[in-house]
Amino acid sequence: MASPDNLVLENITLCAGQTRVLNQVSLTVPLEGITLLSGRNGAGKSTVLRACLDLVRPEKGQILIDGLPPGMACERIGYMPQGLSDAALMIPAISHVMAAMDGARWGVPVRFGQRKREAERLLALTGALSFSKRPLGHLSGGERQRVCLAQALAGQPGLLLLDEPLAALDHDAQQQIVALLVSLTQTLGVSILMTSHETAALEGKVTRVLALENGELHVRI
Ligand SMILES: Nc1ncnc2c1ncn2[C@@H]1O[C@H](COP(=O)(O)OP(=O)(O)OP(=O)(O)O)[C@@H](O)[C@H]1O
């Protein structure tokens, strides 16, 4: 699927608990390639990603992704949240990917064989096919992120929202995941909006940086 053109924020006020994450922010950002959403711990990066998925609603204003509100656009968005539940660690990698292919996502139930083949295709795309039968809890951090990326790619999204995909990885694993992300944008034409504190690993690889600070959002490149 073609990647979304842009993200539009129209006078958005967005809160997480008592924290005002965005304070009357208006902004239009093209989304091609990789966009890095940066900001200190607790600035509200995860909350902004969740608002793009309609998982949290702004107090005021409107978000549009490729002209659609999050409730409609989310069908074209793949999401990789930060961290995994303990339960997820026990299931095989391929089951984790197949779990994202239910009928709710694609509109009609998909047969087991079809889901398995599609999961294998996605795992191959992210370099995770060779460990697809092992439980996530037995994989290295980098291997786990490859499986989670395969899951986020289910349903052929045009946009991936990735929450800290480089967290807790060593230098080499970070470089490998960044190379994979760049290659996914090139081969699949998917756009990526991601959070990360690992700015060194991303240097020269991102199209744009969105800096979130004190309720404001600024485009840095
Ligand atoms: N459901 C919630 N209820 C109350 N407060 C919340 C909730 N979710 C997040 N917060 C608070 O809102 C602020 C923003 O949280 P968020 O997770 O979006 O920040 P972040 O920039 O992603 O942080 P980090 O870099 O540490 O992952 C934090 O102070 C957090 O404690």
Image: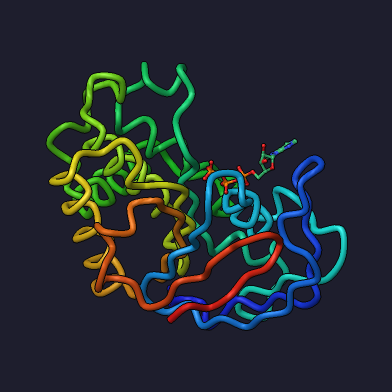
Looking at the picture, does residue 64 appear above or below residue 130?
below
Q: Position of residue 197 (x, y in %)?
A: 40, 51
Give 221 or 182, whichever is nearer the viewer: 221
Give 189 or 120, whichever is nearer the viewer: 189
Which residue is painted at 59% across and 60% down in the image? Answer: 75
From the viewer's perspective, tell me whether residue 8 is left or right of residue 97: right
From the viewer's perspective, tell me whether residue 199 is left or right of residue 67: left
Looking at the picture, does residue 134 appear above or below residue 160?
above
Looking at the picture, does residue 155 appear above or below residue 8?
above
Give 165 or 133, whichever is nearer the viewer: 165
Residue found farthest to the right: 60
- Name the quadrant where ligand 1 sits: top right
Which residue is painted at 39% across and 45% down in the image? Answer: 151
Q: Position of residue 36 (x, y in %)?
A: 43, 65
Which quarter shows the N terminus? Answer: bottom left
Q: Position of residue 144 (x, y in %)?
A: 28, 35
Q: Position of residue 51 (x, y in %)?
A: 68, 56
**In this figure, which colouring scheme has been used for the structure?**
rainbow
Give 56 or 106, whichever is nearer the viewer: 56
Which residue is painted at 74% across and 73% down in the image? Answer: 25
Q: How many tags in the picture?
A: 0
Q: Quadrant of residue 156?
A: bottom left
Which residue is painted at 45% across and 29% down in the image? Answer: 84
Which quarter shows the C terminus? Answer: bottom left
